[in-house]
Image (tube, rainbow, N blue to C red):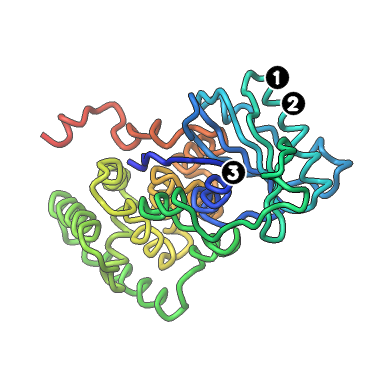
Amino acid sequence: MTQARIRINGPTDLITTVPLLLGFHPEHSLVVVGLLGGELQCTFRVDLPGSADHMEHLRDLTGQLSHNECDECVLIAYGDKEIGEAAIERAAARFDAAGVEPVDRLRVAAGRWFSLTCEEPCCPPEGLLVPETTAASCEVAVAGGYAAADRSAVADQLTPAPIGRRAAVASAVVEILTAEADMDWAAQRSRDLHAIDHWMGVNTLPGPADTAAVGLALGDLDIRDYALRRVNSGQFEGNRVDLWIWVARHMEEDLVAPAATVAGFAAYRFGNGVLALEALELALRASPHYRLAQMLMAALQAGIPPGALSRIGYGDREASEING
């Protein structure tokens, strides 16, 4: 669903592309770009430790690269020279021992990049300016990649809607639940399926009544799984992550987990692991035992590729059985 052939022709291509792959501009971070047969497979980021004397706190990402079948990697440290270079050396040793060859080691700080392996005139000790864009970063942007200013800007996308709008949705929830008392199951199911199809198929976001209808519909596991299957179809721009986030932001805490989980799934399948993490954390804060959110969180933290989620929502049923 999110595959795009990206031509990386050197460090500047990679460095300008990494923020788009992560979804934000990293700081005080170690980024590992996994490769298979020279082609980019995955990108992971971890925080750097507080000092070079505490490298034991640097998270090990060898398992994540193994899940993605990587045979090579590039390591990029963002921030302090001493801490960044110590982190690169520790991580490189781990990857090498796991059979994943570190083919390049880079550091980025204050708008400049430095090579830790090249001593030729093309990589001077004072570093080189990081360009604003390259051909590779433009390819990723055209494919839907976007970089927020920082990690907090990603989390801000899930901030609850203003209290007035949430109150309007809460009132609509009460009205819908009251009306459902006199509605038979078939009519209710038809209405909920129509709501999912309609709002996934338009480029606008719902008002209070329709937001409440979609949020409540996702509380039914069958309807939620139908939404997951529609996401998995790959027919909708950006997997309509905007719709699921909108609904999650407007629902009260006791109703937010289904919408936040679908938002996390849609972001995960689109390749935006950071936004997926934020959405799944929202779901689990609201409902710590929500099983699908737990499963997706475990898969995300283990570095399971987005493509491995293509059967989520089907259960034991075949697509032909559901759609036929």
Looking at the rendered image, the quarter that the C terminus falls into is: top left
Q: Amino acid at mark 1?
A: Ala
| Residue at (53% x, 25% y) in the render | 70
**Dot in front, 3 or 1:** 3
Q: Label 3 to label 1, Cα distance in Å?
A: 24 Å
User: Is residue 156 left or right of 30 when viewed as pictured?
Assistant: left
In the picture of the structure, the residue carrying the numbered disc 2 is: 93
Q: Amino acid at mark 3?
A: Pro
Pointer 2 with pointer 1, Cβ within 8 A? yes
In the picture of the structure, the residue carrying the numbered disc 1 is: 97
Q: Amino acid at mark 2?
A: Ala
In the structure shown, which secondary structural element does the residue marked by tag 3 occupy? helix
**Dot in front, 2 or 3:** 3
Q: Label 2 to label 3, Cα distance in Å?
A: 21 Å
| Residue at (50% x, 35% y) in the render | 299
Number of dots carrying numbers = 3
**First along the sequence among labels 2 and 3:** 3
Measured along the vertical axis of the image, is residue 300 above or below residue 95?
below
In the structure shown, which secondary structural element does the residue marked by tag 1 occupy? helix
Measured along the vertical axis of the image, is residue 316 above or below residue 232?
above
| Residue at (78% x, 41% y) in the render | 85
| Residue at (67% x, 54% y) in the render | 128
Extreme-right residue of the structure:
53
Q: Nearer the viewer, residue 28 or 283?
A: 28
Q: Which mark is residue 293?
A: none
User: Is residue 137 left or right of 220 when viewed as pictured?
Assistant: right
Q: Can residue 229 be seen here?
A: yes
In the picture of the structure, the residue carrying the numbered disc 3 is: 11
Residue 12 position within the rendered picture, expressed as x and y whole percent measured from the top left = 57, 48
